[in-house]
């Protein structure tokens, strides 16, 4: 005895499906970036206000991809997020070289012969994403 089950889906009008689904996806990505930006601005350390005021978000739809971005454009944004120098070693996502003088971006940092010890990371963007994860998932439940 053979037992068989078949399931078939035939969409009649993909343009109609796309016209309904894509705006919902864009709205969900937009809501997610707005949430992460808001949470990160509550977590970002404020000294002069330059860092917090440099925060922004963007949602783009290109082809079949919707991308949401939260970013901070202040020159010191990544240094605050990941830490710097000897003290910050291990709190940022790359290894210090064992020899020589590393060239990092647009500045040279000689961590072997310097008096400045750096500072610990004070992350704000990654924790904001982590804290928002549950809500972000809910944005995509249609």
Image (cartoon, rainbow, N blue to C red):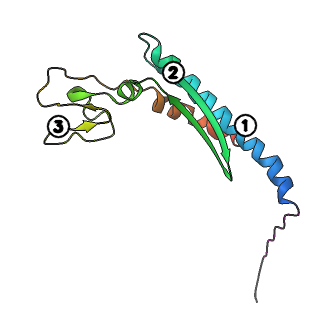
Q: Is residue 57 left or right of residue 105?
A: right
Classify residue 94 by image quadrant. top left
Q: CA distance from mark 2 to mark 1?
A: 23 Å
Q: Residue furthest top?
A: 48
**Is residue 120 positioned above or below 93 on the image?**
above
Classify residue 56 by image quadrant. top right
Residue 132 percent across, percent down from the top left: 57, 32
Circle 3 sits on which residue? 101
Residue 8 belongs to the span the image colors magenta: yes
N-term mark: 2 or 3: 2
Mark 1 crowdedness (10 Å alpha carbons): few <14, some 14-19, many ≥20: some
Q: Residue at x 60, y 36 (%)?
A: 134
Circle 2 sits on which residue? 54
Q: Quadrant of the N terminus?
A: bottom right
Residue 8 percent across, percent down from the top left: 81, 71
Between marks 2 and 1 in the image, the one whose residue lies nearer the viewer: 2
Residue 98 percent across, percent down from the top left: 15, 42
Span shown in magenta: 5-12
Q: CA distance from mark 2 to mark 3?
A: 31 Å
Circle 1 sits on which residue? 27
Q: Secondary structure at mark 2?
A: loop
Of residues 60 and 22, the one nearer the viewer is 60
Q: Secondary structure at mark 1?
A: helix
Q: Residue furthest right?
A: 12
Q: Are marks 2 and 3 in contact (CB under 8 Å)?
A: no
**Is residue 78 positioned above or below 68 on the image?**
above
Q: What secondary structure characterizes most of the magenta part?
A: loop
- Can residue 93 be seen from the camera position used here? yes
């Amino acid at each position: 005895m053979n037992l068989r089950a078949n399931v078939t889906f035939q969409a009649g009008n993909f343009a109609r499906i796309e016209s309904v689904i894509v705006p919902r996806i864009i709205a969900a990505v937009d809501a997610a970036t707005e949430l992460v930006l808001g949470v990160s601005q509550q977590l970002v350390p404020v000294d002069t206000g330059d860092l917090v005021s440099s925060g922004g978000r963007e949602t783009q739809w290109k082809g079949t991809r919707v991308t949401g971005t939260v970013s901070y454009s202040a020159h010191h944004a990544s240094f605050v997020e990941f830490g710097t120098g000897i003290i910050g070693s291990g709190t940022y996502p790359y290894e210090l070289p064992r020899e020589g003088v590393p060239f990092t971006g647009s500045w040279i940092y000689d961590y072997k012969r310097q008096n400045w010890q750096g500072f610990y990371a004070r992350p704000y963007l990654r924790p904001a994403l982590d804290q928002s994860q549950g809500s972000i998932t809910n944005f995509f439940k249609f």
